Amino acid sequence: MTHADFPAALLHRLRHARHIAVLTGAGISAESGIPTFRHAQTGLWSQYDPLELATPQAFQRNPRLVWDWYAWRRQLVAHAQPNAGHTALVAIQRHAPQFTLITQNVDGLHQQAGSTAVIELHGNIRRIKRADDGVIVTAWTETEGELVRCPQTGSLLRPDVVWFGEMLPPDALDAARVAAQTCDVFFSIGTSGLVEPAGSLPRLALHAGATLVVVNPEATFAPHNDVYLLQGAAGVLLPQLVAAVWGD
Ligand code: NAD
């Protein structure tokens, strides 16, 4: 897609938007080398279904297996760099009078790129908490094959992420819903929309009168009057869109 391919009405809408809200999913980090859940896992982990490891039941059944899987993902994240898609959202934040960034991602790459006040709906894989009371823990020791425990209380440790079947942090979800209902443009970027309640935010925005922009290489949204479907990779399309709207 070149500048000329973006609909003029979309460029106008973005240039004059008072509040732009953005929801991102695993797809925006794919170009940073972090696999989405629905992509085949590699090597050691190819035999496991990630959707079944990211549950409280999996942790109850085999806490060490779940710990090891997250330790592997934490390492991927630690070595990853934000990509041009993340950077383009920092530019939009700079240009928009009001901007809200909501992410389902747990990788912290938006913050690393320079985005501020990010609403993390599903937590952050870089933080570790106690399984019983949720207190964040910053130091622990690991012995291969043994359960990883809090040095103070002996409680099992786990990543500070929201697993399938768990509640989202209520403040984050409230803030995301308010943004969806009050913005004039809502972006849905790199998400399949299959995980609720985040999956409903684009429709919430649309029903409240926002223009919806969907950025995804796959067709994840049915054509609709107030929806712009930008089919392609976020790291390619978003910088082009920013250049077309604001000239940088
Ligand atoms: P998903 O795996 O269900 O969907 C990813 C979407 O991204 C797909 O629709 C795919 O077509 C699209 N996509 C792939 N490459 C893209 C690109 N370059 N640009 C734009 N879009 C691209 O992801 P989801 O909807 O976020 O839901 C999965 C859940 O898994 C979330 O709750 C999330 O917390 C978690 N998750 C997070 C990470 C991460 O933090 N990076 C990684 C994997 C899974």
Image: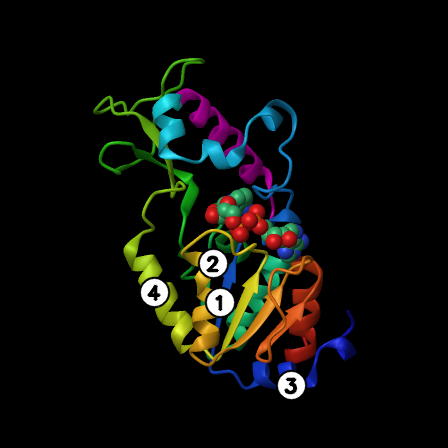
Can you tell which mark lies on residue 175?
4
Q: Nearer the viewer, mark 1 or mark 4?
A: 1
Q: Does the residue at mark 1 contact the one at mark 2 (Cβ under 8 Å)?
A: yes
Say left or right for 187 vs 10.
left
In space, the residues marked 1 and 3 are separated at their CA atoms by 19 Å
Q: Against 104, is 68 above or below?
A: above
Badge 1 or badge 4: first in the primary sequence: 4
Residue that label 3 marks = 9
Residue 210 in magenta stretch: no
Give the numbered dot on residue 181.
none
Residue displayed at 71% across by 77% down: 6
Q: Decide if residue 98 is on the left or right side of residue 227.
A: left
Q: Which residue is mark 2?
A: 199
* Residue under the image location 49 percent in, 67 percent down: 202
State how far apart marks 1 and 2 are (Cα). 7 Å
Query: Does the numbered disc 2 mark a residue whose Cβ is under 8 Å from ligand 1?
Result: yes
Q: Is residue 1 visible?
A: yes
- Residue at the (40%, 21%) spot, across then down: 62
Q: Can residue 83 be spotted in the picture?
A: no
Q: Disc 1, disc 4: CB below 8 Å?
A: no
Q: Nearer the viewer, mark 1 or mark 3?
A: 1
Mark drawn on residue 202:
1
Please tell me whether mark 4 sits on a helix, a strand or a loop: helix
Residue 73 in magenta? yes
Helix, strand, or loop for circle 2? helix
Q: Which is nearer the eye, 7 or 73? A: 7
Colour scheme of the picture: rainbow
Residue span colored magenta? 64-84
